[in-house]
Amino acid sequence: MNTIPSNTLCTKNIFIADDHPFIIQGYKNAITRYRPTEYEFLITQAKDCQSGYEVITNPETKPFDIAFLDISMPIYEEKGIFSGEDLAKLLIEHMPDCKIILLTMYTEILKIKTIIKTINPIGLVIKNDLTFDELLFAIDKVIKNQKYYSQSVLEMISKLEHVAIEIDQFDKNILFQLSKGTKIADIPQYVPIPSSAIQRRIEDMKVLLKLKDATDEELVKEAKSKGLLL
């Protein structure tokens, strides 16, 4: 843990998880420049899903106030942690008061909608929107307990009610295999991701289609009715 001293009135415990060291450094540079006469920031960092898991589940880790999580990071298959979204769910379980900011390169409306529904982060940022000043603005909003969505996210949200549901090729292939009666454990033979990740995608599609407690057969039927599966 890096302690960054300053004459502050309030201490904030920060967690950053990203597999790019220069991005982590950029976040740290912005964080430490936010009202340095008012705040002291204690920053813990992780470089992948495994190190993130170990930090969050360590009983000696002091609860975080704010977490910056990259969505795409090297996975930790042993514990079923495949993304920053999974780390976010882990934080919600272990540190429910932590304010979560998710950062991503994804620009698919489906993905953004799923993230908002399943995680509901206080901050959601498309990395291409991010500048130093914008990051400072995001930090300010979140510390004040206000939601911050970057410009691209806001634009996508405004379109959500006016666009057809979209899914990516992995999801389409999973639906196709389910429609053929393929068992989830056997789907990795046709879709090159682990069965646990396949199960997570199935659950996310059920949330998207408002079928949270539905069977896989009902998911396939609804997908066909929406034109997602021919």
Image: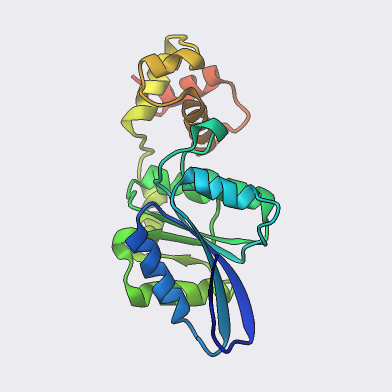
Whether residue 122 sits left or right of residue 152 in the image: it is: right
Position of 5 with respect to 137 (left or right) is right
Give the percent coordinates (x, y) of residue 40: 57, 80
Q: Quadrant of the N terminus?
A: bottom right
Which of 183 and 98 lies nearest the eye of the viewer? 98
Query: Foreground: 26 or 196?
Result: 26
Answer whether residue 152 is visible to the viewer in this image.
no
Residue at (55% x, 75% y) in the render: 41
Q: Quadrant of residue 177?
A: top left
Residue at 63% x, 29% y: name it. Answer: 213
Residue 187 visible? The answer is yes
Q: How is the image coloured?
A: rainbow
**Residue 174 x %, y %:** 41, 22
- Judging depth in this view, the residue of 147 and 36 nearest the camera is 36
Q: Position of residue 14 (x, y in %)?
A: 55, 66
Q: Quadrant of residue 134?
A: bottom left
